[in-house]
Image (cartoon, rainbow, N blue to C red):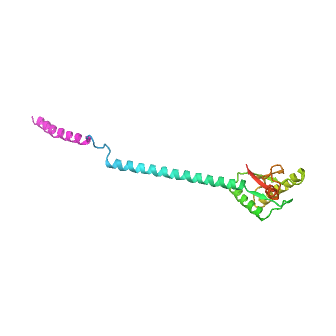
Amino acid sequence: MRKRMWIVMALILVIPGLLLTVSCAKKAVKKGEPAVTTTDDAAEKARQAELERQRQLEKQKMEEERLAAERVKTARDKFENSHVYFAYDSSVLNDTAQSTLRSGADWLRQNQASRVLIEGHCDERGTVEYNLALGDRRAESAKRFLMSLGIDGSRLTTVSYGEERPLDSGGSETSWAKNRRAQFVIK
């Protein structure tokens, strides 16, 4: 009988303890209450803030890359659209021509993979053969100057168009001065 009493006593104490433990383990969610605790809310907000920060950094990086590419293209266009002008019947580089070539050499140093075709041009005066030879001397003069500034000659090629491709087809000294030039084509 005593044994039974101990068993009943034990059951009386154990069963309510188990019920109390089990009932505290799960918290019922009432309608209208958020299922996420405040700790989870803070973690989610921090995660969202980090994602937004990363998006902003990526956006800023893309804008910087776009601006850098635009600067390179602008510098390339400036070099490609610059011309070295010569005096009548001459292939000697004046100070302005040398300054233009120095700027071109700076661009070429920054863009090691680029190659340049230097075109030699003349005005319409003189024979076709003479103007082709003069155009060649003008292109070679520009090439030699660029090489003296440290540009590898294997990156520079020349061609003479003589009087075949005038910038200005007028028959005045102003027109002829525009046509006596070396110009650059970047490959």
Total labels: the figure holds 0
Query: How far from the left and from the top, in percent, is residue 38?
Result: 32, 49
Where 27 sits versus 99, above or below?
A: above
Q: Residue furthest left?
A: 1
Q: Residue furthest bottom?
A: 95
* Nearer the observer, 60 or 10: 60
Is 181 placed left or right of 74 in the picture? right
Report the residue at 75% width, 53% height from top: 184
Query: How far from the left and from the top, in percent, is residue 139?
Result: 81, 55
- Name the dominant secondary structure of the magenta segment: helix
Query: How far from the left and from the top, in percent, is residue 39?
Result: 33, 49
Report the residue at 35% width, 48% height from top: 41
Q: Quadrant of residue 14?
A: top left
* Nearer the observer, 159 or 20: 159
15 falls in the magenta region? yes
* Nearer the observer, 137 or 17: 137
Is 149 placed left or right of 66 in the picture? right
16 falls in the magenta region? yes
Query: How far from the left and from the top, in percent, is residue 64?
Result: 57, 54
Point out the stretch of residues depicted in magenta: 1-29
Report the residue at 86% width, 51% height from top: 132
Q: Quadrant of residue 93?
A: bottom right
Quadrant containing the N terminus in the rendered view: top left
Where 52 sits versus 31, above or below?
A: below
Is 6 placed left or right of 76 in the picture? left
Is 29 placed left or right of 115 in the picture? left
Where 141 sits versus 35, above or below?
A: below
